[in-house]
Image (spheres, rainbow, N blue to C red):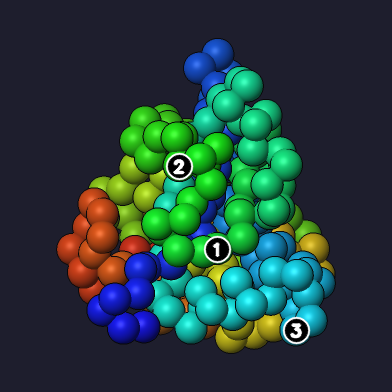
Amino acid sequence: MTEEEPAWAMQLALRIEKAAPPSHLAICEAAAMAVVRLLADPRSAPGGEWYEAVAGWEARRIRKVARRARGARWDALAGLPGVLVDHDGALARAFVPGPVTEVQPEISKRQVGGTDLPRDDEPKPPPEPPYALVTLNPHVAMTTGKAAAQCGHAAQLLLRARGEWPGLRVRVLEADDWAGSVAEADVAVRDGGFTEVAPGTMTAVARLIG
């Protein structure tokens, strides 16, 4: 990418209703699953209608931008090219990536802020293997939107490193033993420093279970 070319990003939309918001970990899981399911979609494969956009984005920094939407503004996103995941009471959409200067108005008008959610009291039981275990760094403060984007990065790196796993399920935890999680990880995410954390910060790791 030259200095004249705009940055590219994958836009994520998180459904966060005032009356019944999803849990922090569930929305992170839904976002990560939406990312890998878009990447594994036949439309993202060579010859598919999304291939050039996905390949062009992955040749750059794998930047993601998480936004919140609710009500009619969420419904307005349904016709845009991308993938929807409905998981454990949380809904997330991943859209076909493109230049940040050309984001569709239905997406660009959705707020990046206001995505923080109360932390889960207890993690839910794990799904049946195989699944991706994404572990967030407990020493790094991140909003839910930021954490969701980092989980998407981790799941994407794992998909590219290990290949697809049946169902493309993702479990997200905050590490009890961060050093141990890093030692066991297949991939690690180091943030680009665009928002919230310093460049190079290790925000999440992932490994394939089963």
Q: CA distance from mark 3 to mark 1?
A: 16 Å
Q: Residue at x 35, y 74 (%)?
A: 5
Of all residues shown, which one is farthest toward the front?
4
Could you classify mark 1 by the number of other residues whose Cα lies within 10 Å: few (under 14), some (14-19), or many (20 or more)? many
Return the residue at label 1.
97
Which kind of residue does numbered mark 3 sit on? Pro
Residue 135, image x and y in percent? Answer: 46, 62
Q: Is residue 161 visible?
A: yes
**Picture quarter containing residue 4?**
bottom left
Disc 3 residue crowd, few under 14, some 14–19, many 20+, Cα 10 Å: few
Q: Which residue is mark 2?
A: 108
| Residue type, mark 1 in image | Pro
Does residue 177 show up? no
Depth order, front residue of 141/63:
63
Q: Is residue 108 above or below residue 210?
A: above
> Residue 46 got which mark?
3
Earlier-in-chain disc, 1 versus 2: 1
Asked if disc 1 and disc 2 are in contact, CB closer than 8 Å, the reply is: no
Q: Secondary structure at mark 2?
A: helix
- Dot 3 or dot 2: first in sequence order is 3
Q: How far apart in space, not on screen, are marks 3 and 2 (Cα)?
A: 28 Å
Q: Is residue 90 left or right of residue 61?
A: right
The quarter holding residue 92 reads top right
Residue 148 vertical position relative to residue 168 in the rendered view, above or below:
above
Residue contact between numbered discs 3 and 1, judged by CB atoms under 8 Å? no
Q: Residue furthest top?
A: 19
Q: Nearer the viewer, residue 160 or 82?
A: 82
Q: Secondary structure at mark 1?
A: loop
Determine the CA span between mark 1 and mark 2: 13 Å
Q: Which residue is located at x 46 percent, y 35 percent? A: 110
Residue 22 versus residue 66: which sits nearer the camera? 66
The image quadrant where one finds the N terminus is bottom left
